[in-house]
Amino acid sequence: MGDAAGIGPEIIAKAYRDTPENMHGIFVAGDVGTMRRAAQVLACPGQPAVPVAVLAAPQEIWQVPPRCIPVLQVEHALTAVPWGQVSAQAGAFAGHCVLWAAHAALRGEVRALVTAPLHKEALAAAGAPFDRFPGHTEMLQDCAAQFLGKPVRDLPVRMMLANEELRTVLVSIHVSMRDALDAVTYDNVLQTVHITHAALAMVLGRSPRIAVAGLNPHAGEGGMFGREEVESIAPAIAAARTAGMDVSGPWPPDTVFMRARSTARRPGEFDVVVAMYHDQGLIPVKYLGVETGVNVTLGLPLVRTSPDHGTAFDIAGTGGADCASLCAAIRMAQGLSATINTSQSSDVH
């Protein structure tokens, strides 16, 4: 459901209201009262709010009629929180929703997980265990590692942001800029390329064309503007090539995203760009349109996608939030889960 004080509940309600044909078999792990409030925000004169159907178990989703919002209450009822304000209560509830859904996916009870935006400050204010995690990605990684009986370090994950024109995968995610620079190591870059290759090979049905961005201006100009490309990035690319991957670079980061972008006029030269840090990779994708971007977590033993925007506290409760990115995340989750299930069936047979 996401943070109850943000736009998550209302974009979910809007998706059920406006695109019911895409919501078959999808339910909300959240709070019934919050979803009813969100549906009411969208109600217009002469147009009643979309009704909420209360589920006792996920399997009941198949009995819910169209244009209803099926909600599974995953915790005790949440007392209404103010729109647009950081709330420890809302942060804790959002965290519990994520953990419930992650466990359901890990147990095979659901095929995919789409997360509405949560607020990182609210998550931290909620206290243990949620204050250990900067966001969804790290929480899901920890949950999956525990489920598999592995240390977190043995389940590396990466964030991919994608739309119809561009994909980018990040070497580091939610860390400070200073820590992001330290994360540009041979091992981290090579691991990112391996995770990217494995995930996209499954989706595309072929070896993906991977471009690796440099860290420094002009990709370091042979060491003149920094040594990371020479000492870490290029050796990792060479190792990936030796392993049979279609990977090139390091390319100047100010032009590689343009080369990778695929449009109606020109197909991209690459299927994906590996970026060295959060903003380097996310700004190009978000510039092309926040409403079409999807966040995908690579490396997890489950399918997880999310919209590429945040809780938008400034417009929460107004009914003005756009559900396009959420709908794109739902479509991608459906496609990925179908691809993975087909691949697993092929392996078995």
Image (spheres, helix red, strand yellow):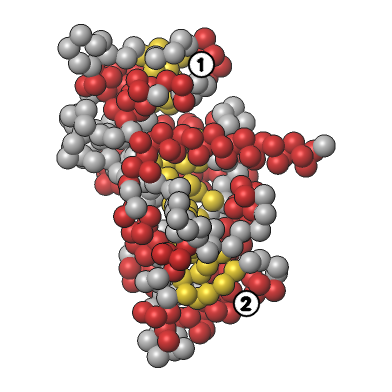
Residue 166 visible to an observer of this rendering = no
Q: Which residue does the image show at 29% across and 27% down from the upper left?
A: 10
Is residue 115 toward the left or the right of residue 156 in the image? Answer: left
Residue 2 pos. (x, y %): 35, 34
Residue 337 pos. (x, y %): 59, 36
Q: Nearer the viewer, residue 217 or 79?
A: 217
Q: Which mark is residue 238?
A: 2
Label 2 sits on a secondary structure element that is helix
Q: Which residue does the image show at 67% across and 49% down from the upper left?
A: 205
Quadrant location of the N terminus?
top left
Residue 13 visible to an observer of this rendering = yes
Which is more foreground, mark 1 or mark 2? Answer: 2
Is residue 126 toward the left or the right of residue 104 in the image? Answer: left
Quadrant location of the C terminus?
top right
Quarter holding residue 111: top right
Q: Which mark is residue 259?
A: none
Extreme residue in the bottom direction: 224
Extreme residue in the right direction: 349
Q: Which residue does the image show at 39% across and 18% down from the upper left?
A: 69
Q: Nearer the viewer, residue 345 or 59?
A: 345
Label 1 sits on a secondary structure element that is helix
Residue 296 pos. (x, y %): 48, 47
Disc 1 to disc 2, C-alpha distance: 49 Å
Residue identifier under label 1: 61
Give the answer, above or below, for where 126 lies relative to 195: above
